[in-house]
Every structure is written in structure tokens, then in C-alpha cells.
Image (cartoon, rainbow, N blue to C red):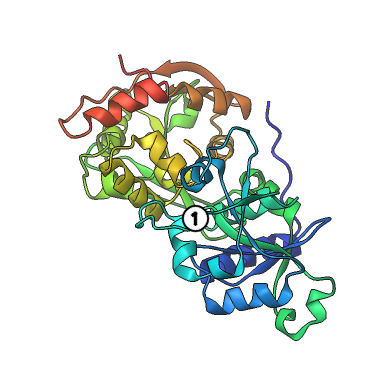
């Protein structure tokens, strides 16, 4: 059973939130560790960010990438399993267009020949910070100079412990609280209610769609559904998300009760913009798994501790799970939820998403038969 740790203290949590905001602005931050790093995302860094890193670094900067992204741009393929790959950024290479192209495989790939160097100690935390900001996990990083905070250029820069960044996703669930509940009649479920949850980061809300009163059932039917802007809202035919969502609500209405946990984890956790990038790569021949990995993300980066915390708050520790994904079953069990039954949720192909569904079955292990 996975133990959810208590939330970070307020000052440390605030530092993580600020670091995420700085990443989206392209402002470098310092990762406090035994060997501190100054880092900024290749996707958002500008001329001023590069200047700050140059002024405050003790050694030349490198570009930190996930192995799945680095393998595509190194002259020699990777043969090891290091979790982060560092590429040397010599002075002629440190320009913004090159960094953008190295980070983003959807851009035209005219790149210089990169040389691999040893990854710094806090490299995992650097990539984790980029992912928390929903950016491409490609970070410009350099060892920071001793006394950097007393140098005028570094006086305003934020410092955040590297360990806090690594722990942060697992700690969010512990701070999840209900913030609103209201009746929202739906076409398929006139008695539906929405319950909104917010974690300590205050930035992303997760929703529970309650049909009837599922908490009164011994093992209510539950669907864990990750938000899909293109499928749920626009009716995209590229996936089966919209029909899965509507089908789940209709089925729960037929049974008299149930709950859909609508998690703000678009694109299996990579975010909407990165999902659109993944679509671009799919249009060039990659499947959905390889497209995510080509961007430097895991095949599935969702945090199901959030779902488990929502179920506990809703007094539903024992459920029947409406899913074709056995990984969801095992993830919830690991978080202390008693999944007494897996209920299939099959949606027929529509002529556009046939290959997508085949990939879910073949490469993600979804039970679609």
C-alpha cells in the first residue's frame, strides 16, 4: 500500500509553486542540493535567462533531456539506462532556436552534433520541475557559483530544494480538499452533482461527477477519467474519450448511482499543449506511446494518488472500477482502494481512432476484447 505523506510546510510549498511559475516565464531558478544547479526550460528561456545562467554558473551549461528524447538527437545511440542525459552546450551552441529545436521534436530538426557529458546530481529534479510546469522536459542547467545569491544578478532568483520537487506530485494528494458541491442536472443523469477538489497548489481543480448517492452502495461503480479537451469538449474522433465519458454517466444513471472522477491530467498527464505536439508526431507516423516518449515524457505520467484521495474524501473506499486499463486497477489498489471488480468499458472504433485503440490494446495492455 502506498503511503501518502503529509504536505510540505507552507514556505516550502510556496517555493515549489513559485518555481513552477518561473519556469513558465523562462526565469532561471536554483535547485538547492549538495551540488546546486541553476536551471531554466529550453522551451521558454530567453536571452536574459541565458545571460543569467552564464553570469552565475561555475562551469559550462548542459542541456538535460530524457533518454527517449536524447536518443533521437545524439550522433550515437544510447545503450545505457541513465534516467537523464546531459548534452554539452558550448558557446556556439547556446542560442535560443537551437535550444527550442533540441527540446521539441515537432520543429524542424536542423541541429548541431551534441556531445554527451556527465549528468549533474540534481538532474532528475530539474526535469521534474519542467514537467510540473507542463513544459517539455528539456532543461538548460549549470552548476551555480558559490555565493551566487550575493551577486547582484542572482539576488532576485528563487532557490528551491531539489528533493521537494521530486516529492511534490505524491504530496499533492495529501492536501486535496473539497471546495464546492452543487447539483448539475445532465441529459443522461438529471440527479447529477459536481464536487470540486483543490490541492495545496491552488492551480488545478479536479472534479467528481456523482450520479445518485454512490456512497450508500457497498461498492459503487466508479470511472477514473482524465480530462480530454479535444475529445470531451470538441468531440474529436482521434480518441474514444468523449464516448467513454458520456457512456459512463449513462451507465451509472441506469444503475441508479456511480461516480466519475474527472482528473485534470490531460494527455495521460503531459498537458494539453504537449498532447497537441504528440498528435503532430502521430501524424508523422508515431503511435500515441512513442509520441509521448519522443517528447521526453513517460508513456503514462498520471498521478492516481489524486483519485484515491478523492474516493476516500467521498467515503468510497470500496468500488467497482469501470475501465479497460488494468494499470488503473493496480494503481488504486496500491493507494489503499479496495477494487472488488473491474467492469469493462468498451467503445467501438469510429473509423478514425481504430489505430489509436489498437495501440491501447497492444502497447498499453488495455482489455478491449
Q: Which residue is mark 1?
A: 134
Residue placed most toward the observer, 302 or 174: 302
Q: Quadrant of the C terminus?
A: top left
Residue placed most toward the observer, 33 or 236: 33
Residue depicted at 21% across the width and 24% down the height: 348
Q: Quadrant of the N terminus?
A: top right
Q: Is residue 209 visible?
A: no
What residue occupies the far left of the structure in this picture?
351
Residue depicted at 37% across the width and 17% down the height: 367
Q: Position of residue 59 (x, y in %)?
A: 74, 65
In the displayed structure, would residue 139 be above or below residue 264?
Answer: below
What residue occupies the far bottom of the structure in this picture?
152
Q: Is residue 315 visible?
A: yes
Question: Residue 353 occupies which quadrant of the picture?
Answer: top left
Q: Position of residue 164 (x, y in %)?
A: 72, 53
In what element is the residue under mark 1?
loop
Could you tell me how many numbered marks the image carries? Answer: 1
Residue 12 horizontal side relative to residue 260, left or right: right
Residue 276 horizontal side relative to residue 38, left or right: left
Mark 1 neighbour class, 10 Å CA radius: few under 14, some 14 to 19, many 20 or more: some
In the displayed structure, would residue 362 be above or below residue 181?
Answer: above
Q: Position of residue 132 (x, y in %)?
A: 56, 54
Q: Position of residue 158 (x, y in %)?
A: 70, 71
Residue depicted at 71% across the width and 83% down the height: 153
Residue depicted at 30% across the width and 48% down the height: 280
Amino acid at each position: 500500500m502506498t503511503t501518502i505523506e503529509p504536505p510540505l510546510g507552507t514556505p516550502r510549498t510556496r517555493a515549489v509553486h513559485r518555481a513552477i511559475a518561473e519556469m513558465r516565464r523562462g526565469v532561471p531558478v536554483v535547485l538547492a542540493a549538495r551540488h546546486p544547479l541553476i536551471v531554466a526550460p529550453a522551451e521558454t528561456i530567453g536571452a536574459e535567462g541565458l545571460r543569467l545562467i552564464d553570469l552565475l554558473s561555475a562551469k559550462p551549461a548542459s542541456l538535460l533531456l530524457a533518454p527517449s528524447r536524447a536518443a533521437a538527437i545524439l550522433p550515437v545511440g544510447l545503450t545505457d539506462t541513465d534516467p537523464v542525459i546531459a548534452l554539452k552546450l558550448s558557446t556556439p551552441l547556446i542560442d535560443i532556436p537551437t535550444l527550442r529545436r533540441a527540446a521539441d521534436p515537432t520543429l524542424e530538426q536542423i541541429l548541431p552534433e551534441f556531445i554527451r557529458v556527465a549528468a549533474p546530481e540534481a538532474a532528475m529534479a530539474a526535469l521534474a520541475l519542467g514537467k510540473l510546469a507542463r513544459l517539455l522536459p528539456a532543461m538548460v542547467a549549470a552548476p551555480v557559483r558559490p555565493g551566487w545569491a550575493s551577486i547582484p544578478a542572482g539576488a532576485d532568483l528563487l532557490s528551491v530544494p531539489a528533493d521537494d520537487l521530486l516529492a511534490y506530485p505524491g504530496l499533492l494528494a495529501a492536501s486535496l480538499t473539497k471546495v464546492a458541491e452543487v447539483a448539475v442536472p445532465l441529459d443522461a443523469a438529471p440527479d447529477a452533482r459536481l464536487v470540486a477538489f483543490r490541492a495545496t497548489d491552488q492551480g488545478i481543480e479536479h472534479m467528481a461527477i456523482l450520479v445518485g448517492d454512490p456512497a450508500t452502495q457497498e461498492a459503487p461503480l466508479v470511472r477514473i477519467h482524465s480530462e480530454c479537451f479535444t475529445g470531451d469538449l470538441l468531440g474529436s474522433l482521434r480518441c474514444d474519450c468523449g464516448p467513454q465519458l458520456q457512456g459512463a454517466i449513462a451507465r451509472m444513471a441506469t444503475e441508479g448511482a456511480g461516480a466519475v472522477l474527472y482528473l485534470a491530467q490531460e494527455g495521460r498527464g503531459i498537458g494539453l499543449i504537449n498532447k497537441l505536439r504528440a498528435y503532430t508526431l502521430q501524424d508523422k507516423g508515431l503511435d500515441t506511446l512513442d509520441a509521448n516518449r519522443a517528447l521526453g515524457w513517460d508513456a503514462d505520467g498520471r498521478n492516481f494518488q489524486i483519485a484515491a484521495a478523492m474516493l476516500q474524501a467521498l467515503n468510497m473506499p470500496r468500488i467497482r472500477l469501470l475501465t479497460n486499463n488494468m494499470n488503473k486497477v493496480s494503481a488504486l489498489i496500491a493507494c489503499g482502494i479496495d477494487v472488488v471488480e473491474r467492469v469493462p468499458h468498451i467503445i467501438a472504433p469510429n473509423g478514425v481512432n481504430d489505430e489509436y485503440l489498437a495501440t491501447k490494446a497492444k502497447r498499453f495492455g488495455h482489455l478491449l476484447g
